Amino acid sequence: MSSIERTAYPRLPRVITLKDLQQSFTPTADEVEWVNGTSRGAALRIGLATLLKCFQHLHHFPPLAEIPPEIVEHVSASLGLSPTQALDYGGELTHTMYRHHRKIREMLGVKAYDEKAGRDLILKTARDAANLVNTRIDLINIVVNEMVRLGWELPAFRTLDDIAEAIHAAAEADLHVAIAQKLNGEQRAWLDNLLHGELPSRQTRYNQLKRSAKRSSRKHLDDLIEQLHWLEGLPDCKAPLAGIAATKLKYMGDVAAAMDAGDMKDFRPAKRHAYILALIHQMQVRARDDIAEMFCRRISTMHKMAREKLQDIQKRQRNLSEELVATLDDVLEILAEKLDDAETGAAVRELLAPKGDLDPLRESCAAIRVWSGSNHLPLVWKPFSSHRSVMFRMALALKFEIPGKDKSLLNALVIVLANESRKAEWIEDEVDLSFASERWHKLIRRSSGQGHPTNRRNLEVCVFSHLATELRSGGVCVDGSESFADYRKQLLPWKDCKELLPKYCERVGLPTTAKAFVENLKNMLRETACKLDAEFPKHAGDVVIDNRGGISVKRTTAKEVPASAIALQAALESRVPSRNILDILANIEHWTGFTRHFGPLSGDEPKIRNARERYLLTTFALGCNLGPNQAARHLSNGVTPHQLSYTSRRHMSLDQLDAACRDLAELYLRLELPKVWGDGKKVAADGTQYDFFDQNLLAGMHFRYRKMGAVAYRHVADNYIAYFRHFIPPGMLEAIYVIEALLKTGLSVEPDTVYSDTHGQSETVFAYTYLSGITLMPRIRGWKDLHFYRPDKSTTYDHIDGLFTDVIDWKLIEDGFPDLMQVAISMEQGVLLTSVRFRTKSTPSIHAGLRPTVRNSPSVSMAC
């Protein structure tokens, strides 16, 4: 049987607060009048009113014994009658209770559930949704919502569960059989052999199938490429899985990943084969994502090493520069002696070339000239050469695609791959380098009269570097990938977006037409600039604008913490008693029942013993960052590492943990004390370095803390509640998760303002936060590199005119309005991940797409 607590089937709250009673169980004046006119006697009026309020809350009539006494007492007091804590419809009054049921349905306009029309509605709704959802819990939720929407009374939960179980089982069986029928006997036997152990390792190949990527070292890169080749050599999963919804595939793959070989053997053959195929597909996609991610990281590391090498060279050349300056000073002294030209020339020659050879001086000048700038590109080859073979293997393992018409980069990649085995430094191929910068042109090309025109080594580094950049920006996509797929294919069609546009714009407060949108931006920029110009003299001592428009902001002095605040903190710490974390978890579970979200992925009731206790202990271990072995050693109740590990793998998915966190957050929002601190509308975003298991792609060296780990990125509201938690690799631009965090909260209170450090500063994020109705307030850095735009050429200002260097291209924003709104609505509907979109638009690309429009739009929102 499904767990009722994990469904949307309405039930009375476990803990009823005074606020709940007042909001949900207080009869209105009209309802009191109706109750008084419908029933006689105090007891019957209390019963009728209580059943009315319970039905409005539940959409079904609960058993009388399950109605909490607090509700009965509150309703009786609201009617002005003597408080009572129980309803009594026993004996001869049972028919009166059913008459009250009919009166309540008539009063609310609700249809009574029956075994014909009501059951037919449930069957039709469940059958229509059976092929789209993953579990019978999802079916129950859809049926409940549909019956409430159509004004039907809900049947008993067992009725819904039995119907959902039958329809879901039939739909799943049909799906599994349809997939299995596309396999031949040899393929079925091969899939079954995956579950059999092999000597001497005694490990099944099914475990190899679930192997995940480790850190991006040379050895792990080779292992991952071999893993992808092995996965692609398995029975073809594209044809059998064609036409199946992505959510269904993900669910089947997640279930198969949580199972071991012994559990998979217990499945029926058709189900077993379908789930293994879904897992193969999921692991193939993940392997391509991991290889592309490793490819980008390795290229980034090579460029970082080259920059560091350039800095070392420049440091070593400081002595050489000082020697050349000293030589120049000696020349000036010779000239100051006012000798005739012949004597002066002879003295200078003796100084510069005492042995008659000027080559050492020329070499010193050439060295200074070559490495004095910031061009590190000539130095990339050396770190690239040590990983050259594996970089070629990664490029060959992935199938790259460019959505646009400019294929010059892929054409250059073909030439690079064709010359992989060549040893000559120069090759005869003519390469279109329109995608590359002038610096690369100088390194790769030479005049035709000097031999073959193309430098093979620099061409390889150039093509792979641009390939990594375009993968990050979305200009190049990987076939069969998820993170590096073409985001344009994920967008909602513009036809659907046009239908959602009025409602979306009304919610975020934006005009619905391109012309009105641009006019609104113009007015906002004018008003903000004029206000800043008028207020600027009052802050002239804090901010200075020089003649070139450069900004200098004076540092502010931090205020000392008052002694009274320190004393208050000490007093609080001395009075607050120490609490055991497990006791706290047990109390929270008693009041909220948050462990109801945990359980098998199927949605069934858990079959493990002492499920609640196991969930609490596993939550404790996860929250304290303890492994199962370490946690079991410190717990005194006899729990074993296997029990903790099994519970974590089989009963506590990320989605279930998020649902439990939302439950606790909602309860926290109902408390009175947090409301004193804030309303939860403002959040601060920042990341914290955490020690992490280093054999995964999240782990890396943090440039600030100088140690391995990952970054826990959080959004904490002004009422001290964590809205969002996400682990990201060190060095990742944190701004790309700003909107995703707010879209994923799922809470009754939606934040509208985000404060962040300089990581939140991004033109792309400024644009889409404005389109999402969110105010982004990051700490701004690099003032001297920012471009300020005036509304039009004719607008001037008295005090801040020197800031502005350009004019907004309003026509570009107006033309790009449909594309901007299509992206914004797609993100709001959840069909496009904001982190993927921001990553692609936050990285420079030769395939600009929407970027010019995005760059102009945030210029207005940043200023305002």
Image: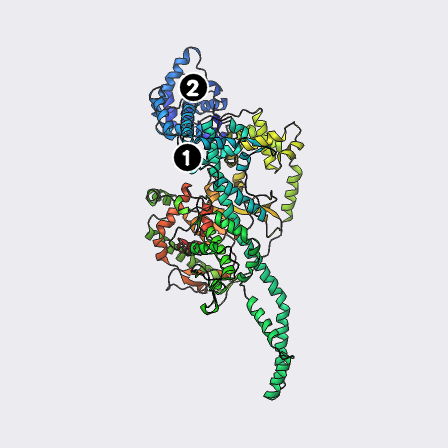
- Residue found at the far top of this picture: 92
Q: Position of residue 772 (x, y in %)?
A: 42, 46
Q: Residue at the bottom extreme?
A: 340
Say which mark, if any, is on residue 240: 1
In this view, the residue in front, 305 or 766, is 305
Q: Are marks 1 and 2 in contact (CB under 8 Å)?
A: no
Q: Element at badge 2?
A: helix
Q: Which mark is residue 170?
A: none
Q: Is residue 14 left or right of residue 579?
A: left
What residue is disc 2 on?
47
- Number of marks in picture: 2
User: Would you place residue 615 above or below residue 568 in this image?
Assistant: above
Q: Amino acid at mark 2?
A: Gly
Amino acid at pointer 1: Pro
Residue 322 x/y as whole percent: 63, 71
Q: Which of the 4 image quadrants contains residue 80?
A: top left
Q: Nearer the viewer, residue 174 or 686?
A: 174
- Which residue is located at x 63 percent, y 84 percent? 347
Colour mode of the rendering? rainbow
